[in-house]
Image (cartoon, grey):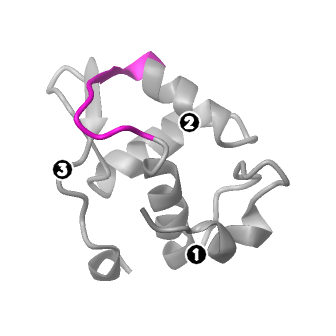
Amino acid sequence: MTDYAPLLRSFLDPDGKLKQFPAKRKMKIIALFYLAEKIEADRDYTEQEINEILLSWHTFHDPATLRREMYDYHLLDRTRDGRIYHKGSPLPNMETLL
């Protein structure tokens, strides 16, 4: 597990929650990896459970955008019907996404 918090310090509140979603690609990807750390590997989640995790780690109340971005960057996978989510396995290499 990597500590992305120091890289995101201007985007995090004192509790470690994202205050805003970075606009620049590099910081956006770092923020998504930060959130991916909050999701357990080898476990299935409902969309609501993923939303609850994301809501507990950001303050701007947009879990749908975060969930879609995590899916687009292969940090989350889901079933075809979108009912079951799980952490991407293996996670992509961050350097290849930057």
Q: Which residue is mark 1?
A: 24
Q: CA distance from mark 3 to mark 1?
A: 25 Å
Instruction: Give residue 18's position: percent from left, percent from top.
Output: 70, 52
Residue that mark 2 sits on: 54
Callout 1 environment at 10 Å: few (<14), some (14 to 19), or many (20+)?
Answer: few
The residue shown at (72%, 55%) is 20
- Earlier sequence position, callout 1 versus callout 2: 1
* Rendered view: 9 above or below 58: below
Q: Nearest to the eye among marks 3 and 1: give it.
A: 3
Does 97 lie within the magenta span? no
Q: Residue furthest front?
A: 1
Residue beneath disc 3: 89
- Return the residue nearer the eye: 25 or 37: 37
> Separation of disc 1 and disc 2 at Cα?
20 Å
Q: Is residue 68 above or below residue 47?
A: below
What segment is highlighted magenta in the picture? Answer: 39-48
- Which is closer to the viewer, label 3 or label 2? 3
As helix, strand or loop, the secondary structure at mark 1 comes to loop
Regarding mark 3 in the picture, which secondary structure is present there?
A: loop
Q: Residue at image x 36%, y 38%?
A: 40
Residue 28 screen position, x and y as percent: 53, 66
Q: Of the residues shown, which amino acid type is indicated by label 1?
A: Lys
Looking at the rendered structure, the secondary structure element under dot 2 is helix
Q: Please, which residue is most extreme toward the right here?
A: 14
Q: Residue at 28% across / 29% down in the picture?
A: 85
Find out whether residue 40 is within the magenta segment. Answer: yes
Give the mark, 3 or 2, whose residue is nearer the N terminus. 2
